[in-house]
Image: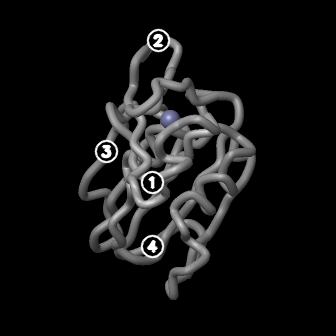
Amino acid sequence: MTIDAIKNGIVIDHIKAGRAMEIYEALGLADLDCSVAIIKNVVSKKSARKDIIKIDADIPVNLAVLGYIDPDITINIIKDGRVAEKKHIELPKKIYGILRCKNPRCITTVEQELPQIFKLTDPEKRTYRCIYCESKVK
Ligand code: ZN
């Protein structure tokens, strides 16, 4: 795979510089069989520096995870060497699975099989709270 062009795959663009690895890990890209390129510190027009991740396969990307990490990211779906679709991400209203409640008295600490669900309570401040005990994340 060349860095410039992929035929069919996904380009995760406008990642804040330095955050590509966090996204790589959150999306579990290490487990993929296809080529994944991480390009760091690219100079862009929009923001001073950015990271880009190129995935050489059309895999389902967890948009909620990306939205939580950085809602300014754009996703380009590449088909036959062209951008077939651009997806803008939003802050997810609810997050499943990637966060754990840190409140020791939360019911999820006792009942481990309960799904960890957090809801967006303040979009301005990007505040998420546990749906069971209302503890704040971050
Ligand atoms: Zn909780």
Which of the two discs, 2 and 4, sits closer to the camera?
Answer: 2
Residue shown at 39%/42% (left/top)?
117
Circle 4 residues within 10 Å: few <14, some 14–19, many ≥20: some
> Which of these two is toward me, 41 or 135?
135
Give the x, y percent position of residue 24.
61, 61
Q: Tag 4 or tag 2, which sits nearer the N-term?
A: 4
Q: What's the CA distance linking mark 3 and mark 2?
A: 21 Å
Q: Which residue is mark 2?
A: 124
Q: What's the CA distance linking mark 2 and mark 1?
A: 23 Å
Q: Which residue is mark 3?
A: 87
Residue 121 is tagged as none
Q: Which residue is mark 1?
A: 97
The extreme bottom residue here reads 33
Give the x, y percent position of residue 16.
64, 38
> Which of these two is toward me, 131 or 81?
131
Q: Tag 2 or tag 3, which sits nearer the N-term?
A: 3
Q: What's the CA distance linking mark 2 and mark 4?
A: 36 Å
**Would you place residue 78 above or below residue 62 in this image?**
below
Q: Tag 1 or tag 2, which sits nearer the N-term?
A: 1
> Which of these two is toward me, 70 or 75?
70
Q: Tag 4 or tag 3, which sits nearer the N-term?
A: 4
Quadrant in the rendering for residue 88: top left
Q: What's the CA distance linking mark 3 and mark 4?
A: 17 Å
Q: Which residue is mark 4?
A: 6
Q: In which quadrant will I find the C terminus? A: top right
Residue shown at 55%/24% (left/top)?
136
Which amino acid lies under the numbered mark 4 shown in the image of this protein?
Ile
Answer whether labels 3 and 2 touch (C-beta < 8 Å): no
Which of the two discs, 3 and 1, sits closer to the camera?
Answer: 1
Which amino acid lies under the numbered mark 3 shown in the image of this protein?
Lys
Q: In which quadrant will I find the N terminus? A: bottom right
